[in-house]
């Protein structure tokens, strides 16, 4: 087998074909995939019918998997169920905290940047797609966002530490979108604003809706700066929008991209996506100082 990589846009994203995850990948094919993921930020892998076991086994080759968040369906397992359907097959009440929590994925974000150890990569596979369409996923490159900053802005960003909070992003999206337990068990954490990819040496601007401010700045000043950078990073001509087909799987590099879900008919249709989330090397800030991956 050989892995074929074809770019999806001029700046980032590629499709990877020529292999079957279920049939297994050689070390060299797997390495080609990880190199492409680091080079392109988003890798679309069409025609990969997966069950949870196959997805977990493939994802674990990329690194240790996170446990699913407290209060989410599947908490404590390695599988995140991003769905409007509960495990018993019924639709979520659209006004429930769990539905609001999932719908807050409509905000641009990077996965798990609100945890002390953020996510390195995520893998999302389509298990059931809305028959009437919708439910696309959009991506932007935060490496391109860093490149587009002026030299003075880059120098500022290089020194900044951002504070990320899941309660902040969820409550901003809709009051009641986070549970009391999530707010208690997931307090705000510091993260380096600029990440350097250890494989490519490329820097990226690690912004996201989870950012509630920057150390050393007032909340108002920090939010204004963050929102201005977010707006530039997510300008329409910077977005890759993925329209899912059955058996698509996508892996993305959370250090170098942001993503967001888009609407579909949540009360009349069904969408079940399964995510596995690969942990980064550890906290990006220790004792107040920025730490780089070795
Ligand atoms: C996610 O944000 O992890 C999932 C995105 C989606 O549901 O399209």
Image: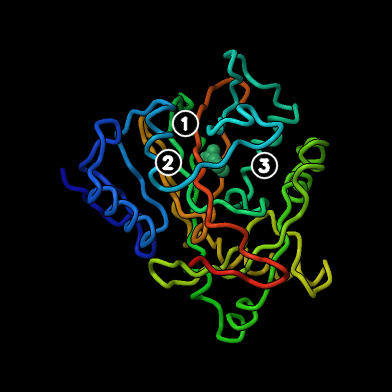
**In terms of sequence position, does the residue under pointer 3 or pointer 1 come before the other?**
3
Q: Nearer the viewer, residue 136 or 178?
A: 178
Residue with the most extreme left position: 1
Q: Position of residue 98 (x, y in %)?
A: 70, 30
Q: Secondary structure at mark 3?
A: helix
Q: Local crowd at mark 2 within 10 Å, few (<14), some, or many (≥20)?
A: some
Give the answer, above or below, for where 269 lies relative to 117.
above
The label shown at residue 47 is none
Q: Is residue 261 visible?
A: no
Q: Is residue 168 visible?
A: yes
Q: Which residue is mark 2?
A: 60
The residues bearing labels 2 and 1 have C-alpha atoms spaced at a distance of 31 Å
- Which label lies toward us, 3 or 1? 3
Q: Which residue is mark 3?
A: 104
Q: Position of residue 244 (x, y in %)?
A: 41, 37
Q: As drawn, is 193 to the left or to the right of 93?
A: left
* Quadrant position of residue 59: top left
Q: Which residue is mark 1?
A: 133
The residues bearing labels 3 and 2 have C-alpha atoms spaced at a distance of 27 Å
**In terms of sequence position, does the residue under pointer 2 or pointer 1 come before the other?**
2
- Which label lies toward us, 3 or 2? 2
Q: Position of residue 202 (x, y in %)?
A: 44, 72
Q: As drawn, is 228 to the left or to the right of 269?
A: right
């Amino acid at each position: 087998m050989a892995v074929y990589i074809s770019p999806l846009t001029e700046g980032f994203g590629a499709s990877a074909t020529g292999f079957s995850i279920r049939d297994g990948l050689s070390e060299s094919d797997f390495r080609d995939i990880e190199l492409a993921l680091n080079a392109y930020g988003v890798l679309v892998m069409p025609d990969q019918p997966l069950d949870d076991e196959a997805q977990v086994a493939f994802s674990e080759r990329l690194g240790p998997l996170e446990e699913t968040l407290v209060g989410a369906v599947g908490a404590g397992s390695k599988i995140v169920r991003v769905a409007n359907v509960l495990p018993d097959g019924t639709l979520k009440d659209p006004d429930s905290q769990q539905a609001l929590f999932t719908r807050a994925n409509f905000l641009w974000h990077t996965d798990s940047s609100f945890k002390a150890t953020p996510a390195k990569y995520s893998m999302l596979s389509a298990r059931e797609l809305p028959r009437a369409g919708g439910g696309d996923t959009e991506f932007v490159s935060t490496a391109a966002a860093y490149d587009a900053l002026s030299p003075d802005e880059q120098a500022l960003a290089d020194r900044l530490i951002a504070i990320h909070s899941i309660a902040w992003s969820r409550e901003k999206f809709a009051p009641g979108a986070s549970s009391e337990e999530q707010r208690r068990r997931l307090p705000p954490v510091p993260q380096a604003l600029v990440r350097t990819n250890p494989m490519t040496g490329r820097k990226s601007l690690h912004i996201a809706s989870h950012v509630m401010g920057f150390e050393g700045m007032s909340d108002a000043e920090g939010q204004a700066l963050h929102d201005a950078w977010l707006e530039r990073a997510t300008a329409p001509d910077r977005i890759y929008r993925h329209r899912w087909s059955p058996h698509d799987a996508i892996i993305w590099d959370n250090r170098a991209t942001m993503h967001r879900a888009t609407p579909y008919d949540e009360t009349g249709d069904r969408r079940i996506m399964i995510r596995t989330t690969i942990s980064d090397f550890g906290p990006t800030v220790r004792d107040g100082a920025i730490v780089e991956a070795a």
